[in-house]
Image: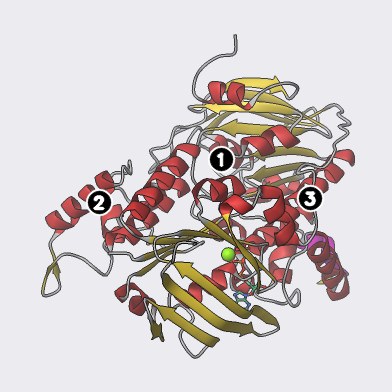
Amino acid sequence: MPEQKSILLKISNVTKHFPGTKALDNVNLDVYEGEIHAICGENGAGKSTLMKILSGVYPYGTYEGQIHFAGSEVKLATVKDSEQIGIRIIFQELTLVPNMTVADNILLGAEPGKRGIINQNQLFSDTERLLKDYNLDIPYNAKVSGLGIGQQQMVEIAKALSGNARLLILDEPTSALTIDETNVLMDIIRDLKSRGVTCIYISHKLDEVFEIADRITVLRDGQIVETHPVEDLDQNKVISLMVGREITNQYPPRKPNIGDVTLEVKNWTVAKHSQAARPTVKDVSFKLHKGEILGISGLMGSGRTELVQSIFGEFGKRLSGELILNGEPVTIGSAEDAIRHGLALLTEDRKQTSLILKHSILANATIASIQDLVRYNVIDPEKELAVTYEYKDKLQIKAPTVHSIVNNLSGGNQQKVAIAKWLMTDPQVLIMDEPTRGIDVGTKYEVYKLMNELTSQGVSIIMVSSELPEILGMSDRILVMHEGTVAGIVENDNVSSEEIMLLATGGSLR
Ligand SMILES: Nc1ncnc2c1ncn2[C@@H]1O[C@H](COP(=O)(O)OP(=O)(O)OP(=O)(O)O)[C@@H](O)[C@H]1O
Ligand SMILES: [Mg+2]
């Protein structure tokens, strides 16, 4: 006799339309009390939309169907309503207030105090206790704007845990976390489970899903494909349910054709930021060749992002060292300079630096290459449309038209628009900082194929990534950073992830 499970959450016949899109199509799903239920699916499958219905972001009346929670039907009007009944969500896109402290953010809306006067001391001590309780290593009085994006994510998690959650929803919580931070999160979730909290877990990282989940549901094109206990599935099965076909190889075959040095970086040093506690870049030197993919690995905070941002001209004068492009010394003092010299930088944080969310796909994609689309001093609208559609197809950007507003795209599809924008500039050096963050397995393969295509045409690529398999799967050489310096540059043959980790943590190879 199978054990009788009690149902905490029952989703019945839920359908949700957006203009031009049916995001959810008659979804039926039961989530058991106390289980960790993972939801997998390609970019745009409808995962976040379903979670926004469960958390009151899309209120009752804006979708069809019913939600039952703890035995009764709920008709949520706001996020507050969902919190009241014990549903807590950590959104895919961070929602913290950058100018406030960690403590203020965590207890925002639930500050201790009387008659509207906040008790600061209690606020700080409550937060400190909460952070300690969950082993989160973040100063409660730090300003959020000075934290790395991984730490910001941990603050989001602490914020969700500050209420009494009965159902915790995590929508891609680890996309910006380090391995250590991810492990802390996994422990927290297990701990919450042992205290009876139910969890819905969304991630494109199937390793994690298989580590933590009791059951997995796959969504495709707004429909539930199947739900199974984790023991009855493996990663390949989940992938094929997600994309509707088999994917045997995660990295496309690569025939490197490496030429002369395109870019040389010599004794590159970045002076300390005014506000950041992060280490700076210290005396970094390396060469990048035509047609090469140079992977940059390192722990979060090791200076990888600062390195590429500074090469791209983002730190103006706070630098010393030399940049030599095609044999000529160059000075790059701004992003405009960088673009003029044929550099492109896909940033790690698309929301803050890459995209104008209220503008269309077309406006965002063409913004960095607009000069190329001008004829007789005016933008050629046909050309603009044609190239944007070309990249929409190439990258499988899921949206009704190229005029769709970027804010309305799913997270992964926003990332694809940012990639399209830089590819359109036709760069000779393409720098990609965490290029596949939030992108589903099928599309990752397409992005990798594109990278290979570009290098075979002579483009040089620098790829910063926290995903070791991706570094090992795609790079010709690997530069490992540790505390702002180069810990080593290794050829990618027979090097193991352990060796990379060793360098990244300050050790040395033999
Ligand atoms: N506010 C909106 N307006 C219009 N369309 C939307 C809106 N929000 C989502 N969509 C569309 O609904 C579909 C589902 O999006 P959703 O964000 O739920 O996908 P997802 O499964 O979370 O994807 P990802 O893995 O990329 O985060 C997509 O086609 C998306 O473009
Ligand atoms: Mg999503």
Q: How many marks can you see?
A: 3
Q: Name the quadrant containing residue 167.
A: bottom left
Q: CA distance from mark 3 to mark 2?
A: 43 Å
Q: Mark 1 falls on what kind of element?
A: helix
Location of the C terminus by quadrant is: top right
- Ligand 2, by image quadrant, is bottom right
The residue lying toward the viewer, choosing from 177 and 47, is 47
Q: CA distance from mark 1 to mark 3?
A: 31 Å
- Amino acid, disc 3: Ile
Name the magenta segment's main secondary structure: helix
Q: Residue at the location (58% across, 83% down)?
A: 13
1 and 3 marks in contact (CB < 8 Å) = no
- Farthest residue in the front direction? 1
Q: CA distance from mark 1 to mark 2?
A: 30 Å
Q: Position of residue 36 (x, y in %)?
A: 46, 57
Task: Please indicate, yes or no, whether residue 128 appears anywhere in the rendered image.
Answer: yes
Q: Which residues are magenta?
A: 370-375
- Amino acid, disc 2: Leu
The residue lying toward the viewer, choosing from 305 and 412, is 412
Residue under pointer 1: 305
Q: Name the quadrant containing residue 203.
A: bottom right
Q: In the drawing, what numbered circle is on residue 130?
A: 2
Q: Position of residue 310 (x, y in %)?
A: 58, 39
Residue under pointer 3: 247
Q: Position of residue 11 (x, y in %)?
A: 51, 78
